[in-house]
Amino acid sequence: MNAFLTVSLCLCALAALSDAVTVKVGDFSFPLESVKKLKDLLNAHHARSPRHVVTVCDDPDLPTEFQLICASPNSEALLKQLEAIARNSEVCEICANVACSGC
C-alpha cells in the first residue's frame, strides 16, 4: 500500500512539474509543453508534405519561440531533434533524456 501511495505521489508531482521541464537543443531552450505543441504542428505538416520539418517554419501557427530555430542554418536538424523528444515526452518528464532538465 505504501509503495502505491509513493508511486501515486511521484506521478502527481511529475504532472505538476512538467511545466517546469526545459528541453535544450543546440543553443536553444524551450518548455516541454511548447515542444509538445510543436509536435502537433509537425504531425499536421507531415500529413501534407514529406519535408514537413522545413515547411513548418512557414506556418503562421508556429509559436514565436521556435522562429529563432527556423532562422538557424541547421534548423532542420534541430527541429528533428525536438520532434523526437516530443514523440517520447514521457522520457523527458522524468528527465531520462539528457536534453531535458528541471524535473
Image (spheres, rainbow, N blue to C red):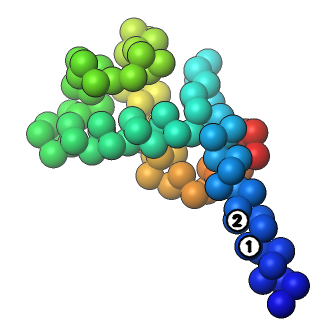
- Relative height, residue 32 to residue 56 (above, below): below
92 on left or right of 40: right
> Residue at horizontal 40%, vertical 38%?
37
Q: Label 2 amino acid?
A: Leu
Q: Residue furthest left?
A: 48
Residue 47: image quadrant is: top left
In the picture, the disc for residue 100 is: none
Q: Residue furthest right?
A: 2
> Residue at horizontal 70%, vertical 65%?
11
Task: Sort mark 1 into few (<14), some (14-19) or many (20+) by Cα contacts within 10 Å.
Answer: few
Residue 70: image quadrant is: top left
- Relative height, residue 4 to residue 26 (above, below): below
Find numbered disc 1 in the image and state the secondary structure of the residue it sits on. Answer: helix
Disc 2 and disc 1: Cα gap in Å?
A: 5 Å
> Residue at horizontal 45%, vertical 12%?
68
Position of residue 95 measured from the top left corner of the image (x, y, whole percent): 71, 50
Callouts 2 and 1 close, C-beta under 8 Å: yes
Q: Out of 51 and 60, give the one closest to the viewer.
A: 60
18 on left or right of 75: right
The quadrant of the rendering that contains the N terminus is: bottom right
- Relative height, residue 90 to residue 60 (above, below): below
Q: Which residue is mark 1?
A: 8
Position of residue 102 measured from the top left corner of the image (x, y, whole percent): 75, 39
Residue 69 visible in image: no
Q: Label 1 amino acid?
A: Ser
Position of residue 22 measured from the top left corner of the image (x, y, whole percent): 65, 34
Task: Sort mark 2 into few (<14), some (14-19) or many (20+) by Cα contacts within 10 Å.
Answer: few
97 on left or right of 48: right
Residue 22 visible in image: yes
Q: Residue furthest bottom?
A: 1
In the picture, the disc for residue 11 is: 2
